[in-house]
Image (cartoon, rainbow, N blue to C red):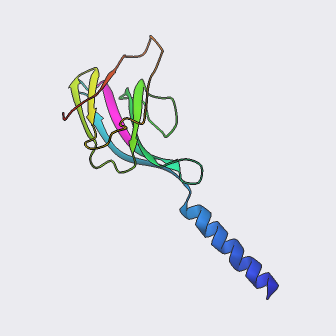
Amino acid sequence: MKQLSRVVVSCVLLCGLTACGCVDEYVDTLPSSDGTLKAELRHCGCSLTTYRRTQVTVLESSRKAECMASTGVAGFDAPFDHAPLKLRWRSNDTLHASYPDYPDFPQTQYSAGDPARPKVTLVFQGEP
């Protein structure tokens, strides 16, 4: 009986950890008008170690994004519920983002410091 209870506890713990595992899920891509860049949305994070979020990575159209990788030329984090997030390319190098009714948007943002890579401006204001 004692061995059976250990097996049950182990199974419950394993199932719980699997359900709370890490997420790296592709959501959508928004290409720039000239097609050289793209904004890629992914659901990222591990609920046991960090919060889950929507990651927006701007990168060259030939590159692939993945969660928490520095493949992009710019990017930012938004809340996990990406439905209210609105993205629009204003030009080939300016991405406009808005997240209505969310006061701390964006949660984080970055821009690559490599002068050989394209420069992208991220604009966070009002409705696009």
Q: Which residues are magenta?
A: 36-41
Give residue 93's quadrant in the image.
top left
Q: Quadrant of the N terminus?
A: bottom right
Whether residue 96 sits left or right of residue 18 in the image: it is left
- Asked if one can make out residue 48 in the rendered structure from this viewpoint, the answer is yes
Q: Quadrant of the C terminus?
A: top left
Task: Name the residue rendered at 31%, 42% in the picture.
Answer: 102
Magenta span contains residue 40: yes
- Up the image or down, 107 lies above or below 13; here it is above
The image position of residue 26, as x and y in percent, is: 40, 47
Residue lying at the far right in this picture: please name it: 2
Give residue 18's quadrant in the image.
bottom right
Magenta span contains residue 7: no
Residue lying at the far front in this picture: please name it: 103
Task: Name the residue rendered at 75%, 84% in the picture.
Answer: 4
The image position of residue 111, as x and y in percent, is: 43, 22
- Asked if one can make out residue 33 in the rendered structure from this viewpoint, the answer is no
Task: Name the residue rendered at 71%, 72% in the picture.
Answer: 10
The image position of residue 108, as x and y in percent, is: 44, 33
Give residue 32's quadrant in the image.
top left
Q: Nearer the viewer, residue 29 or 56?
A: 56
Residue lying at the far bottom in this picture: please name it: 1
Whether residue 79 sits left or right of residue 7 in the image: it is left
The image position of residue 62, as x and y in percent, is: 39, 29
Q: Main secondary structure of the magenta part?
A: strand
Q: Nearer the viewer, residue 76 or 34?
A: 76
Residue lying at the far left in this picture: please name it: 128
